[in-house]
Image (cartoon, rainbow, N blue to C red):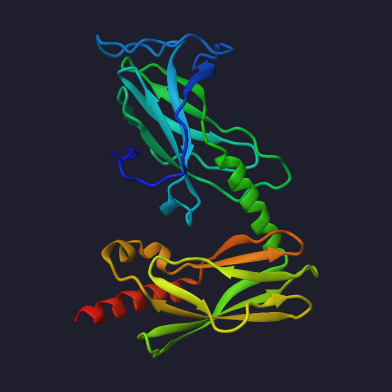
Amino acid sequence: MQGMSRSGRRAVPLAMATVLVLGTTACTGGTTTGPAAPAEASSTGPGPVARDEVLLGELLQFRRDVPARRLQVRLTTGVDGLVVETVELVARGLPTAESTATGVALRPGMPLDFPVPAGAGDCAVEPGAPTARVRLRDGTGARREVTVLLQDGGLVHRLHRDDCAEQSLRSLVTIEVTAIDAVPTDDGPALEVVVRLSRIGGTTPVRVTGLGSNTVYSVTARGPLPTLDRQEAVDLDLRLLPARCDVHALGESYRTGLIGLVLAVGDDGPRPFVLTPEPADRARLETFAVETCRARTE
């Protein structure tokens, strides 16, 4: 079933909290204001959606969803017979689209995740607490829309902060892979990769202060870590050596082709930055890792 939560997923840690439905709006236009008392789960079959309906709401993001900027709205109910028709995430400073999961039945006590794509953070406003506008249908066919507060453990604020830092960085420089070459080494075949930082605006220095980890490759710098100051461009020379060939590492192929950097802009502290190469370059990084690991076992 689309939207079903699966065990074993790694997600941003969040504390589950009971969330009361606020500002519930019936399709006929009537409204209620303020939280109401929770309803007991029905044991005699589905009934109309009551004004005192209670949902549990969380907002989280799984590691695999980070590159696609996808979030998950997790909903749980204690009432039989409810179907979620639409879910819209509302969070000031974080533009989002409506969930693609529609017509999904909620079962009492069983959380369901609804994927929601997120856009780039709006840095002109401060981030706000997330809510979800959920359109429900009950067993009689009656529909209504409810607003659910979402517990997020600070996720929206972190996404907004990181988005705005990256937007500031990208207003100063472009960062791209300009060369990939296979080379022999004493430890086996490796790739030599050139990452170029090119000035496109401002004069604020951008320093490469470190390298991030990779699921398969051991990534090392071939020479000093550069600083882009008044030059038009600087190159960061890397060597990528396949170091982990276990099934788990190779199974996370979506991360193999990403290059992690640690950058500092001006007087700001270092921050992680994930470089996503062009599709052809990313595919080459992934293919080289698989083929090199396979050759070691033959």
Q: Position of residue 102 (x, y in %)?
A: 38, 35
Residue 126 screen position, x and y as percent: 70, 40
Q: Quadrant of residue 139?
A: top left
Query: In the image shown, does 7 or 150 lie closer to the viewer?
Result: 7
Q: Measuring 29% from the left and 14% from the top, which residue is drawn there?
A: 46
How many numbered markers are drawn? Answer: 0
**Nearer to us in this view, 133 or 257:** 257
Of all residues, the one furthest to the left in this rendering is 298
Could you tell me if residue 195 is visible in this image?
yes
The answer to whether residue 287 is above or below residue 251 is: below
Q: Which residue is located at x 30 percent, y 19 percent?
A: 81
Q: Residue placed at 38% from the left, 38% from the top?
A: 101
What quarter of the picture does the N terminus occupy? top left
**Quadrant of res 55:** top left
Q: Above or below — where is 159 with respect to 56?
A: below
Indicate left or right for 120 with 143 as reference: right
Residue 102, can we see it? no
Figure quadrant of the C terminus? bottom left
- The answer to whether 138 appears left or right of 234 in the picture is left
| Rendering coords of residue 229 (x, y %) | 76, 75
